[in-house]
């Protein structure tokens, strides 16, 4: 197996760094510090809404699985 010499790795890294420094432009965006509070509130509501919907539908899924088990047990001659 052939290894890459240190000078080759250095040349690659130096070229990549020079390219990044030459291409990068200064940031012109500004994010208001109050935006994070509003965003976190929206994410909290979305998370707990999805959690509540999951728990709500989990009840129906559990009851459907229980009914399916009893139907299959009766179909195959086993009593639960």
Image (tube, helix red, strand yellow):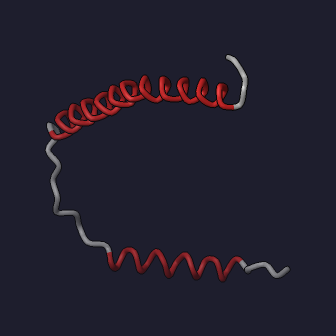
Whether residue 30 sits left or right of residue 24 in the image: it is left
Q: Which quadrant would residue 55 be assigned to in this image?
A: top left
Q: Nearer the viewer, residue 41 or 56?
A: 56
Q: Is residue 35 above or below residue 19?
A: above
Whether residue 76 sits left or right of residue 50 in the image: it is right
Question: Which quadrant is the C terminus positioned in?
Answer: top right
Q: For the view shown, which residue lies furthest in the top direction?
A: 80
* Residue 66 in picture, x, y percent from top left: 55, 23
Whether residue 12 sits left or right of residue 59 in the image: it is right
Q: Nearer the viewer, residue 14 or 47?
A: 47
| Point 46% across, 74% down: residue | 17
| Point 27% across, 35% down: residue | 46
Question: Which quadrant is the N terminus positioned in?
Answer: bottom right
* Residue 70 in picture, x, y percent from top left: 60, 23
Q: Nearer the viewer, residue 60 or 68?
A: 68
Q: Is residue 21 above or below residue 46?
A: below
* Residue 31 in picture, x, y percent from top left: 17, 49
| Point 48% across, 23% down: residue | 63
Numbered-mark total: 0
Q: Which quadrant would residue 9 be assigned to in this image?
A: bottom right
Q: Is residue 15 above or below residue 67?
A: below
Q: Which quadrant would residue 45 be assigned to in this image?
A: top left
* Residue 7 in picture, x, y percent from top left: 67, 81
| Point 26% across, 72% down: residue | 25
């Amino acid at each position: 197996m052939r290894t890459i010499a240190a000078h080759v790795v250095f040349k690659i890294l130096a070229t990549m760094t020079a390219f990044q420094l030459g291409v990068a432009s200064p940031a012109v965006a500004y994010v208001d510090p109050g935006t994070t509070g509003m965003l976190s509130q929206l994410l909290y509501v979305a998370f707990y809404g999805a959690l509540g919907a999951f728990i709500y539908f989990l009840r129906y899924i559990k009851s459907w699985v229980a009914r399916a088990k009893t139907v299959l047990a009766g179909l195959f001659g086993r009593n639960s």
